[in-house]
Image (cartoon, grey):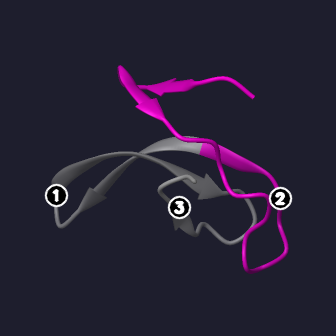
Amino acid sequence: MGEFYVDGYVLKRPPDACGCGESVFRPVHEYHGGDSVGPAWECTGCGGIYDGI
């Protein structure tokens, strides 16, 4: 599947499906309390965040 780049970071591939059943993800930059924690995948169905596998 190759590598994905988000904000200059290499991102692992997204999971095959989210717990809600959605299988489409979009790359985002994850923040917790205003602190940047790096690139992640957001489920387009429920908005769940995954670090990649």
Disc 3 versus disc 1: nearer the observer: 3
> Residue at left 60%, top 66%?
47
* Residue 38, x across and y down, in percent: 30, 44
Q: Position of residue 37 (x, y in %)?
A: 24, 51
Report the quarter where the N terminus lies: top right
Residues at marks 3 and 2 touching, judged by CB atoms closer than 8 Å: no
The label number, if any, that marks residue 23 in the structure image: 2
Is 24 covered by the magenta stretch?
Answer: yes
User: Residue at coordinates 48% horizontally, 43% vertically from top-left?
Assistant: 28
Is 25 within the magenta?
yes
Q: CA distance from mark 1 to mark 2?
A: 28 Å
Query: Spatial distance from mark 3 to mark 1, Cα to Cα?
Result: 18 Å
Circle 3 residue: 50
Q: Position of residue 36 (x, y in %)?
A: 20, 48
Circle 1 or circle 2, nearest the eye: 2
Quarter holding the C terminus is: bottom right
Tell me if 31 is positioned left or right of 6 in this view: left
Amino acid type, callout 3: Tyr
- The relative height of residue 40 versus residue 43 in the rendered view (above or below) is above
Identify the residue position indicated by label 1 in the image: 34
Q: Secondary structure at mark 1?
A: loop
Per the picture, the main secondary structure of the magenta-coloured stretch is loop
